[in-house]
Image: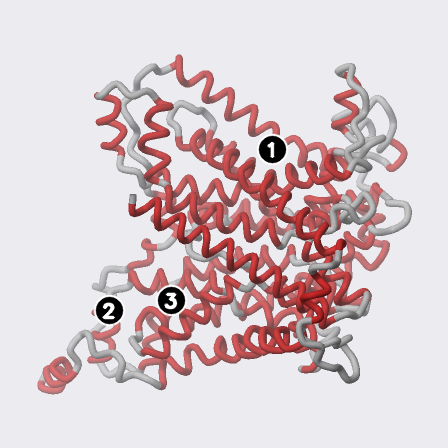
Amino acid sequence: MTTTDMPRPVDAGPARAVSKKRPRRATSGGLRRAVPATTLLWVLACLYGLPVLWFILSSLKPASDLFSYPLTLVPHNPTLSGYLTAWRSANFSQYFVNTAIVCVITTILTVGVSCCTGYALAKYDNKWLKVFFICILATTMLPSEVMLAPEFLVVRNLGLYNSFAGIILPAVLTATGCFMFRQFFLTVPDELVEAARIDGARELSIFLRIMVPLSRPIMLTLAILSFQWRWNDYIWPLLMLNDPNKFTVQIGIQSIVGAQNINWSVLLGASVISMIPLIAIFLVFQRYVMGADINAGLKD
Amino acid sequence: MTKRASAVSASPPRRRSKYTLAPLVLIAANVVLFSLFFVWPAVIGLVYSFTNYTGVGVFQFVGLDNYHNLFGDSAFYDALSRTLLYAVLFVPLNFAVSLLTANLLVSKHAKGASVARVVFFIPWLLSPIVVGVLWRWLFGENFGLVNYVIEKLGGSAVPWQSNADLSLLVVVMAASWAWTGFSMLLFIAAIKNVPVSYYEAASLDGAGPWRQFISITLPSIAPTSFIVILLNTINAMKEYPVFVALNNGGPGTSNNLLVQYIYETGFKRGQIGYASAASFVLMLILMAVAIIQLIVNRRVENR
């Protein structure tokens, strides 16, 4: 028996949330109500967009123009010198590579581990699984910030201090990831599992060969979220790393802010460079992020 | 065929608990991670909070001394009260703007919503460190855009960095700006799930948009409002990176929040035991927040 004739629950994921447009209400008032709503929306959008725009435009100014009055929105002589200095100085390119390595490995592990756990929680019915589900819930109640010191000692005792593993491993268990996969697998009909069992498939191969491919949209959504959390992490890498060659981008930026005299040209360049990967990923996978069913217990 | 029939009769749909090994294998990795990085730190944190441990060497149990000292420590009180003030300002502001933007984006009257939605969302992508840097650049006292505009309009420069209350306010605005996109997404999903027929019925009864918002939208999205308020309160209580990049808890130490206080006592001054005690006070506050909000939520839903 093949599974091709089964209803494919792929669309139960974010794609559905995106495509599910609200039916339009009957028009009443038309233009009279469109004008204030649109105006308010765009005034707010400008308020939200302007800081980023101002920041990016400023980063294109040469250092000498940064503080020259009167301030101008558009740089007179746009230059990439701030970016180049940032990239070359203070190991910034090294930080960038470090962060990328940490983010990619953490994300792969997070997606894999969350997928396994979410599937077990959704499709098996044991008492101890329910207990473990409550344990995962508990991790949202006790955020890692609360356990900075003891968690630091544990990781140090495990011999992971000043290593990427010390940043990666504690971040792999996420309640959000487990929830997302659990919710998704609950929507997959049990009959699909039963049918595969009747065909003699073993439990783990049902999971690997049927369920994992089905959950691709959730994997992508969680991957984007996880990448973002790890890319933006600050306090844990700061505690874990003391070798400047292993610093992440956020620590690099913060070290420029903490300097006696802030080099704004370098700081702006470095900050904008650090934004690029996430903005790029977001623009490519926008519909997954926007439609993510992220209502359940969010925690990074 | 007989094999299939027997397999079906042997496993009625509700008896799935006969599988033990497979789910165990599937959750094994998370069980290990949970024990190592959650249970273990939580237990030793609790133990250390009753000791004078410094992170190295031997330590002694000091009973409740750490907790006792905390309540006599004015720096701790300042951090705690500043954190609560920050949460009290941040949570309602974030709630209001994200609900407003969500409503505008869902409204059929507002044009260009798909572009505006991306604009509102982008700040959420930026790291808290970059958010801090960005707002520091915007609100620089001598060079920032905001003071420049204020001076252009005839006002005088505002001491955004050297006045403790104003510098807290800047962080509140920065954090609300950064978190709007996320809360907004939750609200959009909730508002879209309100049955359209409710609004149609209300329209027939002559209810205006404001009345519809109060009587239909707000009650319908109450569970989401609850989640947004809960998450934002917890996030506010453990805020740190935005402060560190925007004003480093300054001016001076006036805006050192709880997590910064824990970080500085634990890691800069090596008072792990004392910092652990402070952590547990923070945890108790977070649990109290969650429990109070759960109770309120239940009341509202049962009404």
Quarter-of-image position of residue A272: top right
Seen from the viewer's position, the closer of residues B44 and B33 is: B44
Which element carries disc 2, helix, strand or loop?
helix
- The residue where tag 2 is placed is A190
| CA–CA distance in space, label 1 to label 3 | 38 Å
- The residue where tag 1 is placed is A48
Q: Nearer the viewer, mark 2 or mark 3?
A: 2
Where does the image place residue A258, in percent across and percent down from the top left? 83, 51
Image mark 2: chain? A
**Quadrant occupied by the C terminus of chain A:** bottom right
Query: Label 3 near label 2: C-beta < 8 Å?
Result: no
- The residue where tag 3 is placed is A213
Query: Label 1 near label 2: C-beta < 8 Å?
Result: no
Quarter-of-image position of residue A120: bottom left
In this rendering, is residue B84 above or below A131? above
Label 2 is placed on what type of residue? Answer: Asp
How many residues crowd around disc 3 within 10 Å: few (fewer than 14), some, or many (20 or more)? few
Horizontal arrangement in the rendering, residue B245 relative to residue A221 (left or right): right
